[in-house]
């Protein structure tokens, strides 16, 4: 009822300046075949490894022995948008923990819903699946969705080096993962990570809440890039951290997301229609563009998570002069709560040169996206693709090759594992002296100031 009132109260703003046709787009599913994230056998092996490491660490005096009397930790969200991402948000939840021990097709999530799964072989989903949306493979390729520690703790096991582009059952392969023990003895698992993306910290090292652990990937049993987040309490019992009618606990989250959490994940412009028909694991052809010639095709798209029935998106397109060129809205007549949606329009009548602003409002949230209409287009995007860095890992100096264009048009930034900017250069430089950086993993971002496109490299200081 509350939602309906909100829609009605926004109605006076829906004055159409011109007729806008129907949107294109639709629904994009994640893990439609309900593939088990991890086998019981693999879980048992992991637990054995963790116990061996924990015993070793205790013996070495490197792990505070678990004190069951300590309160369980409270979690921050384990997925974070990378500083280099220009999306509004990067994740959505596809599956919760299955509380119904019977199978198959006997499922119940914490909210007494069915946003979870089991398999005929007896697997009941034992974690929370958080996948990247939109353009999962593109996000993985460009390190745009980071996995971070949900609470402070100590790494008690780590697994890297596994193939990370699984599209189907891959039961012979392990996932890349990090396992963290918290001060009360509870543990969090972070699985399916991207190969080689894991923090340089190892077993016995401590991590703070929010500290970078790796990049979301598709290693192990997986149909696409997502994080499988699994929790055990101090007595090694599986925990569903979400509190609800069918999981009567105190939430382990500091700020538990709503069961239905409608959100704009991105407002983007494209040179051709966005689509998701790429064969797995090919990176989506995003057709992302932020610079257009006058009166050529501009595709304007919104990417929603948890679209609810009878909600509306409100669109406003501002010309460089500040006037409203178009103003329209779209009623969303269906719910898509276990999948995601994207909707777009094509315009070819933008002639005013300069910076345009597209503003989309959904469920009280407003997201804006800027793009250029210019008399000429560069070929910067293709050029960015040719850039490479070496050596990597590096000692003192990092060289960037393949750059043959105007240095003043590009900027550079280096981010640490916490997503903090440690170096910023307003102008491109093909040699970076990074002697003063401490050892570890960083991300170098090279950005085209005009088009907004960028390329990101994972770099390691030896
Ligand atoms: Zn999972």
Image (tube, helix red, strand yellow):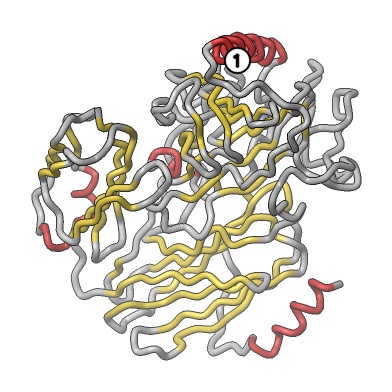
Residue 312 position, x and y percent, is 68, 72
Query: Which SS class for mark 1?
Result: helix
Question: In the rendered view, would you say 378 is above or below 386?
Answer: below
Q: Does mark 1 have its CB less than 8 Å from ligand 1?
A: no
Percent x, y for residue 451? 28, 63
Q: Depth check: 137 or 69 in front?
A: 69
Q: Nearer the viewer, residue 432 or 401?
A: 432
The reply, left or right, for residue 412 in relation to residue 165 is left
For the point 73% across and 37% down, the residue is 72
Q: Quadrant of the N terminus?
A: bottom right
Point out the image quarter for the C terminus. Answer: top left
Quick one: 364 or 205, which is closer to the camera? 205
**Which residue sits at x=77%, y=52%?**
259
The percent position of residue 407, horizontal first and vertical second, equals 11, 57
Q: Position of residue 415 (x, y in %)?
A: 33, 47
Q: How many numbered callouts? A: 1
Which image quadrant is residue 71 in? top right
Lateral position of residue 106 relative to residue 442, left or right: right
View extreme (front): residue = 61
Can residue 123 be seen in the rendering of this structure?
yes
Is residue 224 positioned above or below 319 on the image? above
| Residue that badge 1 annotates | 54
Q: Residue at x 54, y 83 (%)?
A: 327
* Residue 34 visible in the current orientation: no
Q: Is residue 427 above or below residue 346?
A: above
Q: Residues within 10 Å of mark 1 (few under 14, many from 20)?
A: many
């Amino acid at each position: 009822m509350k939602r309906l009132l909100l829609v009605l109260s926004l109605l006076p703003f829906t004055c159409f300046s011109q007729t806008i046709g129907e949107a294109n787009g639709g629904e994009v599913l994640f893990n439609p075949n309900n593939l088990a994230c991890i086998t019981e056998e693999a879980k048992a092996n992991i637990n054995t490894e963790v116990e061996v490491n924990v015993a070793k660490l205790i013996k070495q005096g490197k792990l505070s022995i678990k004190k069951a009397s300590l309160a369980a930790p409270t979690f921050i969200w384990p997925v974070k948008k990378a500083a280099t991402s220009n999306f509004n948000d990067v994740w959505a939840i596809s599956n919760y923990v299955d509380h119904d021990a019977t199978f198959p097709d006997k499922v119940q999530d914490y909210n007494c819903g069915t946003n979870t799964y089991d398999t005929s072989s007896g697997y009941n989903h034992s974690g929370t699946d958080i996948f990247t949306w939109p353009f999962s493979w593109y996000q993985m390729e460009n390190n745009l969705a980071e996995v971070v520690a949900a609470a402070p703790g100590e790494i008690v096991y780590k697994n890297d080096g596994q193939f990370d582009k699984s599209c189907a059952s891959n039961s012979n392969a392990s996932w890349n993962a990090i396992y963290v023990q918290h001060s009360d003895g509870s543990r969090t698992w972070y699985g399916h990570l991207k190969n080689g993306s894991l923090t340089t910290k190892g077993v016995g090292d401590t991590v703070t809440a929010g500290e970078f652990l790796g990049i979301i990937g598709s290693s192990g049993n997986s149909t696409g890039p997502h994080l499988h987040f699994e929790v055990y309490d101090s007595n090694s019992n599986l925990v569903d951290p979400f509190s609800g009618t069918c999981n009567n606990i105190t939430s382990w989250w500091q700020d538990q997301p709503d069961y239905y959490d409608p959100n704009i994940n991105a407002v983007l412009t494209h040179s051709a229609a966005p689509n998701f028909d790429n064969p797995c694991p090919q990176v989506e052809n995003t057709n992302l563009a932020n610079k257009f010639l006058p009166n050529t095709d501009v595709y304007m798209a919104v990417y929603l998570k948890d679209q609810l029935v009878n909600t509306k998106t409100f669109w406003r397109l501002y010309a460089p002069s500040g006037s409203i060129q178009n103003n329209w809205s779209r009623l969303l007549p269906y719910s898509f709560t276990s999948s995601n949606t994207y909707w777009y329009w094509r315009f070819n009548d933008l002639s005013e040169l300069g910076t345009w602003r597209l503003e989309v409002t959904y469920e009280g949230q407003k997201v804006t996206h800027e793009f250029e209409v210019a008399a000429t287009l560069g070929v910067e995007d293709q050029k960015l693709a040719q850039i490479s860095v070496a050596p990597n890992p590096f000692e003192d100096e990092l060289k960037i090759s393949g750059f043959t264009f105007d240095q003043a048009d590009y900027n550079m930034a280096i981010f640490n594992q916490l997503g903090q900017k440690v170096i910023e250069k307003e102008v491109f430089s093909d040699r970076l002296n990074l002697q003063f950086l401490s050892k570890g993993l960083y991300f170098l971002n090279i950005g085209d100031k005009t088009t907004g496109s960028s390329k990101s490299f994972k770099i390691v200081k030896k």
